[in-house]
């Protein structure tokens, strides 16, 4: 019963101190804004995808109806690919702000289509947009510091410390309960908007629980840090401002210095070509093919597609099968650079995961983006699906082009369709 009385007393203590109430209310408003802006962004992305899906079908039917051969149909037809935001993506936008989440691809060389919007070689973002993950990992520790830096020193400066320690039966419990009650109030103010937003957005109970658990764990860590620092004997003679400065130094070290230094080390350790280099290499190979003998294209193409060795004879200076063959060779020429680029991204992300263990805020963001399916791995998975889909398009068109099949729009009804995991789930439910 005494603990309940202590908790009630500390709750009353917070309520009487307007600046503490103001801090907690400010955290609540920031959480509301982070959740609202995140949901707004993901809804905009989802609406964009749905609009493009409808337009994609209409445009494809219209284009195909005006073609007279499969080569032209392949050239003029765009195919939409996309990566839908998960129901909890609003909480941690992660790499969706760095990598494209939609592409319209054609039967042309793929590397240029993938990286033409990625020519600046974007890498791991250190901070990102203001979302719930940013609030939890970067700003919440500051609120903990504001609330708890004067846990003991504030009472000393007010002349109440000796009275409190004399009148309480357990000094450690007094300060611990005060720290826990204040942190619990802060945590509630931050978590409640997220939970409401997640439920409205259709997030699963498991993902909601996981993100709430991460929030509580990170809050508990900073509560423990602030509680321990304010209780060190070395800080007993310090005023509140100096203790706050010490805590801010810790925050700066593990929230900013370690991630930034780690990122610079990773960049130096893992070299990578740029997206622009990949695009340039592929386009030079494609453009240069016009001036090369036909045999140069066929040699490169047949190295990976020997099944068409008996179908390379040409009766004119231009045939669609030759055109798409040198598009394929363009991709093959850029393949080593593209592979190195993807390997470098994966290696950098792996090294960043090790550094994250030295930076709890960085680790918090990484875990949240993994739950939200917005991390680097998710974006690389989307790119892999684009490549698989484009390969399916080639496998569909090559037999038509090399076997000189008579054109029919009805044949195009069997074109491969791009699907996502959510599309497959919807189809299964139906």
Image: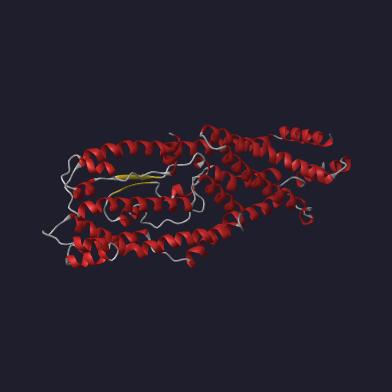
Relative horizontal placement of residue 175, taking residue 251 as reference (left or right)? right
Where residue 271 appears, x then y in whole percent? 44, 66
Q: Residue at x 76, y 41 (%)?
A: 178
**Quarter of the N terminus within the rendering:** top right
The colour scheme of the drawn protein is secondary structure
**Quarter of the C terminus within the rendering:** top left
Relative horizontal placement of residue 198, taking residue 284 as reference (left or right)? right
Where residue 377 appears, x then y in whole percent? 48, 53
* Front-lying residue, 272 or 225: 272
Relative horizontal placement of residue 263, taking residue 171 as reference (left or right)? left
Q: Quadrant of residue 135?
A: top right
* Front-lying residue, 179 or 15: 179
Count of numbered badges drawn on the protein: 0
* Front-lying residue, 250 or 159: 250
Relative horizontal placement of residue 101, taking residue 369 as reference (left or right)? left
Where residue 88 appears, x then y in whole percent? 52, 40
Q: Is residue 363 visible?
A: yes
Where residue 217 appears, x then y in whole percent? 66, 46
Q: Residue at x 67, y 35 (%)?
A: 21
Q: Is residue 280 visible?
A: no
């Amino acid at each position: 019963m005494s603990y309940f009385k202590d908790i009630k007393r500390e709750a009353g203590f917070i309520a009487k101190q307007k600046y503490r109430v103001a801090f907690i209310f400010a955290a609540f408003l920031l959480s509301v804004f982070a959740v609202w802006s995140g949901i707004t962004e993901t809804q905009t992305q989802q609406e964009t995808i749905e609009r493009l899906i409808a337009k994609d079908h209409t445009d494809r039917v219209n284009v195909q109806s005006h073609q007279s051969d499969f080569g032209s149909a392949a050239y003029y037809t765009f195919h939409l690919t996309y990566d839908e935001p998960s129901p909890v993506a609003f909480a941690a936008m992660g790499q969706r702000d760095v990598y494209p989440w939609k592409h319209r691809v054609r039967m042309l060389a793929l590397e240029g289509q993938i990286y033409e919007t990625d020519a600046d070689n974007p890498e791991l973002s250190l901070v990102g947009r203001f979302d719930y993950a940013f609030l939890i990992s970067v700003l919440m520790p500051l609120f903990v510091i504001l609330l708890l830096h004067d846990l003991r020193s504030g009472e000393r400066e007010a002349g109440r410390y000796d009275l409190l320690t004399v009148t309480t039966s357990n000094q450690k419990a007094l300060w611990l309960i005060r720290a826990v009650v204040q942190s619990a109030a802060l945590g509630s103010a931050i978590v409640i908007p997220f939970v409401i937003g997640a439920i409205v957005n259709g997030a699963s109970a498991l993902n909601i629980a996981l993100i709430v658990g991460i929030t509580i764990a990170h809050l508990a860590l900073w509560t423990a840090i602030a509680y321990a620092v304010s209780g060190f004997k070395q800080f007993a003679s310090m005023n509140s401002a100096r203790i706050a400065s010490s805590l801010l130094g810790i925050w700066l070290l593990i929230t900013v210095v370690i991630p930034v230094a780690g990122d610079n080390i990773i960049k130096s350790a893992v070299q990578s070509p740029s997206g622009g280099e990949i695009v340039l290499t592929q386009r030079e190979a494609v453009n240069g093919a016009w001036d090369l003998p036909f045999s140069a294209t066929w040699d490169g193409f047949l190295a990976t597609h020997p099944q068409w060795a008996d179908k390379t004879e040409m009766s004119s200076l231009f045939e669609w099968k030759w055109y798409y063959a040198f598009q394929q060779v363009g991709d093959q020429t850029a393949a080593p650079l593209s592979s190195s680029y993807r390997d470098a991204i994966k290696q950098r992300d792996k090294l960043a995961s090790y550094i994250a263990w030295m930076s709890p805020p960085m680790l918090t963001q990484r875990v949240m983006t993994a739950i939200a399916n917005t991390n680097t791995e998710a974006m690389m998975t989307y790119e892999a699906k684009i490549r698989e889909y484009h390969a399916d398009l080639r496998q569909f068109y090559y037999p038509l082009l090399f076997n000189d099949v008579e054109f029919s729009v009805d044949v195009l009804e069997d074109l491969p369709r791009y699907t996502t995991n959510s599309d497959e789930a919807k189809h299964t439910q139906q």
